[in-house]
Image (cartoon, grey):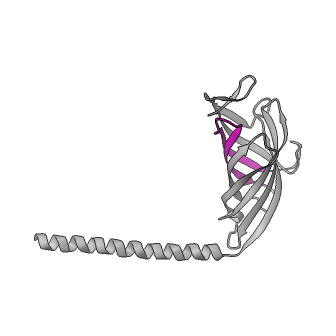
Amino acid sequence: MPVAKLKQVGSLHVFVYFVSSAALAVLLSASWQWLAAAPTRPARMRLFMHDVLIGPGATAAEVVNGTGPSLFEGEPPLRFGHVVVMDDALTEGSNPASRPVGRAQGMYVFASMHDPALLLCMNVVLTAGPYSGSTFTVVGRDNMVKPLRELSVVGGTGRFRMATGYVLWRTASWQQRKNAVLDLDVFIHVHAYAHA
């Protein structure tokens, strides 16, 4: 094939690539504008998360022992870089014997060198109630010594598909620096088009 013909074919491929990329960008932009304008309805729920690190029925495991500065004294000290993976029970009330409504599955990392603050990432898997079978994802900073923290809801599945919102997070109890009950007040904006 002559060189002039190869340049013409190459130029055509570049032209088609740019035109198709521009068309895709316009389509995606239009779909995001439609999504942003889609109606939402609020949902609110109160959940209690039981994070059990020691004793019978432990639901969380320390997988990396941090090597950074100590954030809490004691044995063993909690340090920057400490990582815990969890599959915690969610219940209607603060008592572990309360009606189970789901699981909190994810991890938290002591991610601040100066404060006992965690980077938390978890999926809330609901197994009872009107949202049974749906999930939503919570991500954010949890400064454990603050009485009230706010974390983000960044999406979900089923009835919470494309959900946004926040969780007001409080420590209801904390025993032996290991076992905690957390009070989660969840506010979610559910897109009207999401369904189970």
Residue toward you, 29 or 59 = 29
Mark yes or no: residue 129 visible.
Answer: no
Q: Position of residue 104 (x, y in %)?
A: 73, 47
Mainly helix, strand or loop, the magenta region?
Answer: strand
Viewport quadrant of the N terminus: bottom left
Give the residues drawn in magenta, as a range. 102-127
Q: Where is residue 84 in the image (x, y as percent from the top left)?
A: 67, 36
Residue at screen point 83% across, 36% down: 174
**Relative to residue 7, is residue 76 drawn left or right?**
right
Q: Position of residue 132 (x, y in %)?
A: 76, 59
State whether residue 23 is above or below residue 92.
below
State whether residue 26 is above or below residue 100.
below
Mark yes or no: residue 149 visible.
Answer: yes
Give the residue at the far top of this rendering.
Answer: 75
Residue toward you, 90 or 5 = 5
Viewport quadrant of the C terminus: bottom right
Residue at screen point 72% across, 67% down: 190
Q: How many labels does the image show?
A: 0
Residue at screen point 69% across, 47% down: 141
Q: In which quarter of the image is residue 19?
A: bottom left
Residue toward you, 187 or 86 = 187
Q: Position of residue 96 (x, y in %)?
A: 86, 42
State whether residue 166 is above or below residue 72.
below
**Relative to residue 7, is residue 83 drawn left or right?**
right
Q: Is residue 174 magenta?
A: no
Q: Quadrant of residue 117?
A: top right
Give the residue at the far front of this rendering.
Answer: 114
Give the residue at the far left of this rendering.
Answer: 2
